[in-house]
Amino acid sequence: MASVKELRLRIKSIGNIKQITRAMEMVATTKLRRFQERAIATRPYAEEISTLVQHLAAALGEDLEDQPLFRAGKGERTAVCLVSSDRGLCGPYNSNLFREFEAGLRRLDVLPEALDFFVYGRKGYQYLKSTGRKVERYFTEPELEKIDYRGAARVAAALREGFENGTYKKVLVLHTAFESMVKFVPTWVDFLPIEAASFQSDDDGGRKDSDIILEPDAETIFEHLIPRYLETRIYNGLIQALTSEYASRRMSMKNATEAAGDMQGELKQIYNRKRQEGITKDLLDIVGGAEALR
């Protein structure tokens, strides 16, 4: 059983840890709110560009399948882009991501040696290295926390380049989708080739014969617009991953703070009990000594 002095030091140590975890929880909450605002701010642009791409796809009709990014690549390899966190202390965020990563690879009908890996996030890079997988490209600039549209465009360009030059027949992206403050789900995205069916709906027929005049023609606009569309998808995935990371970190630090408080309370009870036992023993010694002197 620990002494009163040891208990006092332990209570103080846990109190210091509690202050740190509470501060980290507050930082995570602030950053979470900031990333949520960025995600909300980019939503109108993402919706508009998706609507425009859908309209142009309807205008192209069957010619859509002739677009190179809408057909399977000429290569025999498959590229997988993994988006993880740069830092730890975010609860099960990375472990859930890596579990889905392994499960997704098992579902793919692809030999392990036919896979190339791209990664954004230090934890993902360390995981791929620890499992003996070769990383084709590790994105470090800018840091994931400082990602902007220009950085996302570079990632999209690197993935698109390998697909267009005939290296890859398919490009997949795995990131964590933010659904709520307590729910974030690792999600696979079929990045390339683009599924033509995703741009076709029952409403497209009316748009195809609309009176809108396009200058230049729809095909030229479409070819210039698709790269922006792919960049938007990557940026949206990175922002969702960041938001999920800080939501998980906030929850983890909150749980750690509460656990430290509970542990501190239990130790204080033991400390008070032992202190009271010591005082009672001292009083009994004094009373016994006084009785002996009589």
Image (spheres, helix red, strand yellow):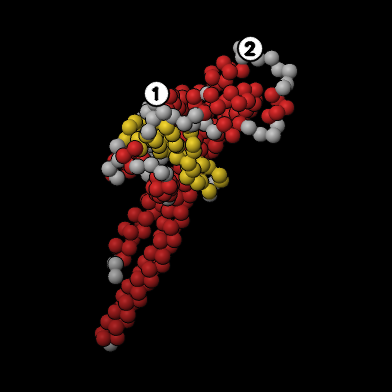
Total marks drawn?
2
Which residue is at the front of the view, 12 or 122?
122
Which residue is at the front of the view, 90 or 210?
210
Can you say which quadrant of the picture contains the N terminus?
A: bottom left
The residue most toward the top is 216
Q: Picture quarter containing residue 285?
A: bottom left
Please name the residue shown 35% across and 38% down the image: 115
Q: Check disc 2: other Cα within 10 Å, few if <14, some if 14-19, many if 20+.
A: few
* Image position of 252 (left or right of 8): right
Task: Name the residue type under label 2.
Answer: Glu
Please name the residue shown 35% across and 71% down the image: 274
Can you say which quadrant of the picture contains the C terminus?
A: bottom left
The residue most toward the left is 293
In the depicted structure, whether residue 168 falls above or below residue 126 = above
Q: Mark 2 points at which residue?
A: 215
Disc on res. 165: 1
* Image position of 220 (left or right of 249): right
Which residue is at the front of the view, 185 or 131?
131
